[in-house]
Amino acid sequence: MQDYRKLQIWQRAMKYTTELYKFSTKMPIDEKYGLTSQLRRAAYSIPLNIAEGAGCNSNA
């Protein structure tokens, strides 16, 4: 099993997610449960998917 934390793409995805979270705090309060929530979930799914893929033992 590969350590996903050492992957440069995972590190960049985490940085992107952090920056997006900071950006989303500046969005209008009426978007808190709409667009803001959707953006955060989408951004966080990127490093999660990379970590999941790094844990697979496949020859594909």
Image (tube, rainbow, N blue to C red):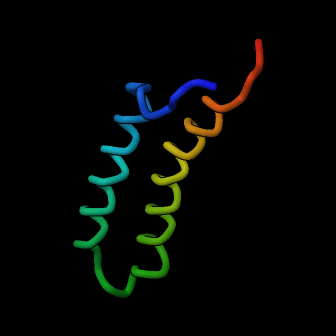
Question: Can you give x and y, in whole percent of width and height, for residue 40 in the image?
Answer: 44, 62
- In this rendering, is residue 57 above or below 55? above
Position of residue 16 in the picture relative to residue 10 (left or right):
left
Q: Residue at x 37, y 87 (%)?
A: 30
Quarter of the image with the C terminus is: top right
Position of residue 33 in the picture relative to residue 57 (left or right):
left
Quarter of the image with the N terminus is: top right
Is 22 or 48 nearer to us in this picture? 48
Q: Residue furthest top?
A: 59
Quadrant for residue 31, please give it.
Answer: bottom left
Question: Can you give x and y, in whole percent of width and height, for residue 54 in the image?
Answer: 61, 29
Is 1 or 9 nearer to us in this picture? 1
Q: Residue at x 51, y 66 (%)?
A: 38
Q: Residue at x 57, y 24 (%)?
A: 2
Quadrant for residue 28, please give it.
Answer: bottom left
Position of residue 5 in the picture relative to residue 57 (left or right):
left
